[in-house]
Amino acid sequence: VGDTEKANSNSPSQSFLKTPKGLSVELSKAFPAYDLLSQCCLCITTVGANTAELGALAVPMIVLIPTQQLEAMRAWDGLPGVLANLPVVGAGLAKLINWLILRRKRLFAWPNIWAQEEIVPELVGQLQPQEVAQVVLDYLEHPQKLEIMRSRLRSVRGEPGAAQKLAELVKEELESF
């Protein structure tokens, strides 16, 4: 893992992660980062609400569920994250959850759950950097696969404008009183 450093640029708030081989990766603290995320051709992520956000933006993603990283489970959304953070029993529960994940093949990314099939790849198990890199490179070298994933994400997310439609319905109901 590299060091975090301030960039030598006009923006003193820019931070970069510098890898041991010299690659600088810009770190963004923007929240929500929808503008930045929507520019991505492929995201590497883990389970949680972020998969729903990426799906809503139709951003292709690869979801990693590394079962050898029990500590990563503590950052999960929902019940698994709560259980993994319990004092004294959290580590044991994290191991149990890992065992259940490996034993039962199910979908974890929200777009996959909505579609009831795998739209975005979910890599589960004792993940190695080389195998993850191979999957990433395969998608980057075959942009048509990314476009198919993007199209499928668009179809499962539904039509845009749900918030506007809801606001109009509420307004109509209030005006009817």
Image (cartoon, rainbow, N blue to C red):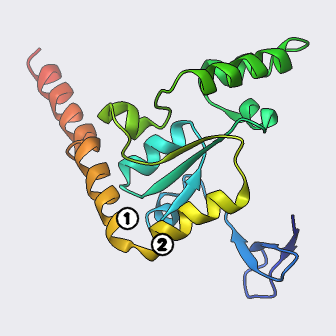
Name which residue lies at 45% across and 51% down: 54
Per the image, the residue denoted by label 1 is 146
Report which quarter residue 60 is drawn in: bottom left
* Relative to 87, 173 lies left or right: left
Q: Residue at x 50, y 27 (%)?
A: 105
Q: Is residue 92 visible?
A: yes
What residue is at 69 percent from the left and 47 percent from the top? 127
Sooner in the amino-acid sequence: mark 1 or mark 2: 2
Give percent across and percent down for residue 53: 45, 46
Across and down, in percent, residue 147 comes to: 31, 65
Quadrant showing the N terminus: bottom right
- Could you tell me which secondary element the residue under label 2 belongs to? helix
In three-dimensional space, the C-alpha distance between marks 1 and 2, rounded to whole angstroms, equals 8 Å
SS of the residue under disc 1: helix
Contact? badges 1 and 2 (CB < 8 Å): yes
Dot 2 alpha-carbon crowd within 10 angstroms: few under 14, some 14 to 19, many 20 or more:
some
Amino acid type indicated by mark 1: Leu
Residue found at x 34% / y 36%? 117
| Viewer-closest of 16 and 107 | 107
- Left-right relation of 118 to 92: left
Percent coordinates x, y for residue 75 in the rendering: 71, 35
Residue position for label 2: 140
Left or right of 175? Residue 47 is: right
- Say above or below: 89 vs 15: above
